[in-house]
Amino acid sequence: MKGRKLLMIPGPIEFDPAVMREMGKPTTSHLDPWFMEQFGQALERMREVFMSPSGQPFIVAGTGTLAMDMAGANLIEPGDRALVVNTGYFGDRFGALMERYGAQVDHVRAEVGDMPALEQVEEALRKQSYKLVTVTQVDTSTGVLADVKGVAALARQYGALAVVDGVCSVAGEELRMDEWGVDLALTASQKAVGAPPGLALVVAGPRALEAWRKRKTPVCNYYADFGNWLPIMEAYEARKPAYFGTPAVNLIAALNVSLGQILAEGMEARIARHRKMSDACKAGITALGLRQLPREHCRAHTMTAPYYPEGVDAALVGKIGAAGVIVAGGLHPACRAQYFRIGHMGAHTPADILAVLGALESALAASGYAFERGAGVAAAQKVFLS
Ligand SMILES: *Cc1c(COP(=O)(O)O)cnc(C)c1O
């Protein structure tokens, strides 16, 4: 036995061996010419991965929540109004965070597993003027894929900034920042971007930077302030030394390897591969008779969120683990105990999808659930071989 289980949760994910090898190299000075080149390249590559030639990338040590915090801290001033297009737990988090910076926040919600209709979003924008609109591209708590293109177009039409939480989607789902008029998008290293946890990644477009520059009050978060990080990002991109806070040298070098792999695969090919993996996984889930939390019209391609079938409870997650694959339990407070989550993003392959479905079948059999043995794996394989 190899003594290691396959990690298939919605982040952290399995990382490519070349990325992990980069992590293990001796740490250089943060001002070493070699590291300046890695950091500079990573910034340039972020623009391509976010499809934002006009954007300003930021790479800062922290988690995805810090990336959200940077958006809130820099764009919100006390009294500003913000609209959250809410599809789950991370929409709630964005709302709470912006309230902390003094925003008046409204939420447009849908039933759990659904996304609010664009008409609902437009109605809210017509009634009230907002400085910004946030949308979670894939809410990891529900597996709902939101219509970012549609929301961003509405935000633009009504004069609001469009801010996208892309933590579970950037480099896995289609996100065309400049083309769609997204003003700020953010993610974290450990999800579809494919490097170990520890980096907050933000791309701010010209309108977002202009809103930050026009602030009347100081940014109420010293570490998150664009003003502290912008000169650093500009310096590293020019391969010049600069210091504000010590960059996460090994992590940034590893991120650069992963971003290089992503661009070598090509964004279109990568998005198509994530769709195929997702289709295969979901076909397997359906063939086993399991329903899914997100509605059919808004299902993410970076993860799958199946309900436990009749007579099976959350102990299934442990049984899948015993069969060699780590999946995640539920996260949304309204239905946490009723579903589980499979992450499929980054450098994953058909073999990983077949393994997770195989382990799921073993676990379902051990739980006494009646199903046709092999049906899940077969349905996924049919998608791969089609
Ligand atoms: C994981 C995740 C976050 C939070 O990222 P952390 O790195 O855990 O702080 C935020 N939003 C979404 C959509 C996520 O999937």
Image: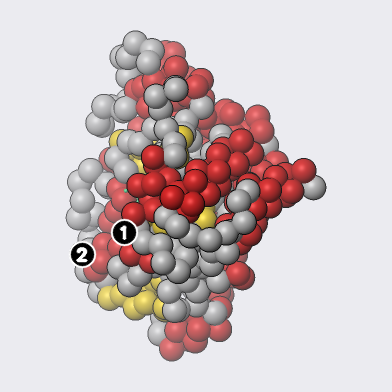
Instruction: Write down the residue under mark 2.
Output: 100
Q: Residue at x 37, y 77 (%)?
A: 107
Residue 169, placed above or below residue 335: above
Q: Residue at x 50, y 74 (%)?
A: 114
| Picture colour scheme | secondary structure
Amino acid found under the numbered disc labelled 2: Arg
Q: Position of residue 188 (x, y in %)?
A: 40, 43
Residue 182, placed above or below residue 124: above
Q: Residue at x 20, y 46 (%)?
A: 222
Instruction: Write down the residue under mark 1.
Output: 72
Residue 352, placed above or below residue 103: above
Horizontally, residue 331 falls left or right of residue 377, namely: left
Q: Position of residue 338 (x, y in %)?
A: 38, 66
- Tell me, yes or no, whether the two marked residues, 1 and 2, touch with CB atoms within 8 Å: yes
Q: Position of residue 331 (x, y in %)?
A: 34, 60
Q: Is residue 236 visible?
A: no
Which numbered circle lies on residue 226?
Answer: none
At numbered mark 2, what does the secondary structure look like: helix, strand or loop?
helix
Residue 253, placed above or below residue 62: above
Horizontally, residue 374 falls left or right of residue 141, namely: right
Q: Position of residue 45 (x, y in %)?
A: 55, 34
Horizontally, residue 285 falls left or right of residue 199, namely: right
Disc 1 residue crowd, few under 14, some 14–19, many 20+, Cα 10 Å: many
Q: Is residue 283 visible?
A: yes
Q: How many marks?
A: 2
Amino acid found under the numbered disc labelled 1: Gly
